[in-house]
């Protein structure tokens, strides 16, 4: 089933996403990069999204990948790390329209190392999704992370305004089409949070 009828990529075209998928395949698949992605998805983004989401959302709309990569780089600096520019190619963003004036800002991370190699203290993310009600979250937002799970392969976590991590369920397979289909099917369960 083609999902193209449900989604209109705004920040990236389908051909660009395919090309980026190829580039992302060469991005680092090591424990250190996965830890930095975890810190970005579970600490840096929630801190900024829940204090004021508009700068991030406007930046994504105007600058796409470069906005997210710049913020990822800032997050790495917080942890005294700098990455080579080529390492950043695995961080990709796309914006999708959903019914009822909802938007999904989806950030893709490089595929992490297999879970058995990973440190059990953290779960490396595959995707982050900022679900907004209104293009700039005028009606609120929800922030979700699809990450690794040693039990089910993937896990979907809701990050709340007070930074709680609520494991919702086993997530979708870690590819963009499946993740978007999963979000679309469950969209009504993600009620807005002002």
Image: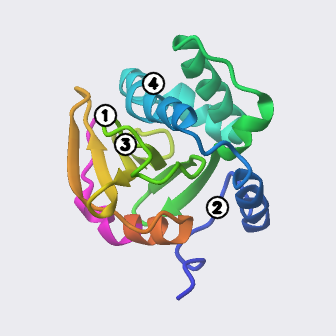
Other residues around mark 4 within 10 Å, as few (<14) / some (14–19) / many (≥20): some
* Residue at numbered disc 4: 44
Tell which residue pokes out farthest to the front in this image: 117
Q: What residue span does the magenta drawing correspond to?
A: 184-194
Mark 2 lies on residue: 9
Find disc 1 in the rendering and name its residue: 121
Q: Nearer the viewer, mark 3 or mark 4?
A: 3
Q: Residue 115, percent across and down? A: 41, 52
Left or right, 135 with respect to 24, comes to left
Residue at x 47% of width, y 32% of height:
35
Is residue 88 positioned above or below 125 on the image?
A: above
Q: Secondary structure at mark 1?
A: loop
| Spatial separation of the CA atoms under disc 1 and disc 3 | 7 Å
Q: Position of residue 164 (x, y in %)?
A: 21, 32
Measured in 3D between alpha carbons, the distance from the residue under mark 3 to the one under mark 4, in whole angstroms, is 15 Å
Query: Residue at 26% of width from left, 60% of height from top?
Result: 151
Q: Is residue 10 above or below residue 15?
A: above
Instruction: Specify whether residue 123 is painted magenta.
Output: no
Residue with the mark numbered 3: 123
């Amino acid at each position: 089933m083609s999902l193209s009828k449900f989604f209109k990529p705004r920040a990236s075209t389908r051909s660009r996403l395919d090309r980026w998928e190829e580039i992302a395949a060469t991005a680092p698949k090591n424990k250190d990069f996965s830890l930095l992605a975890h810190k970005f998805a579970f600490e840096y983004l929630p801190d900024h999204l829940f204090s004021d989401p508009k700068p991030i959302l406007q930046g994504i709309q105007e600058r796409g990948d470069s906005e997210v990569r710049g913020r990822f780089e800032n997050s790495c600096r917080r942890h005294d790390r700098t990455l080579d520019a080529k390492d950043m190619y695995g961080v990709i963003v796309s914006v999708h329209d959903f019914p009822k004036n909802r938007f999904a800002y989806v950030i893709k991370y490089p595929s992490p190392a297999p879970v058995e190699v990973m440190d059990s203290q953290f779960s490396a993310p595959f995707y982050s999704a900022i679900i907004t009600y209104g293009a700039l979250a005028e009606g609120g937002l929800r922030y979700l992370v699809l990450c690794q799970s040693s039990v089910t392969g993937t896990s979907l976590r809701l990050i709340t305004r007070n930074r709680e991590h609520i494991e919702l369920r086993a997530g979708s397979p870690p590819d963009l089409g499946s993740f978007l289909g999963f979000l679309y099917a469950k969209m009504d369960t993600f009620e807005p949070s002002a």
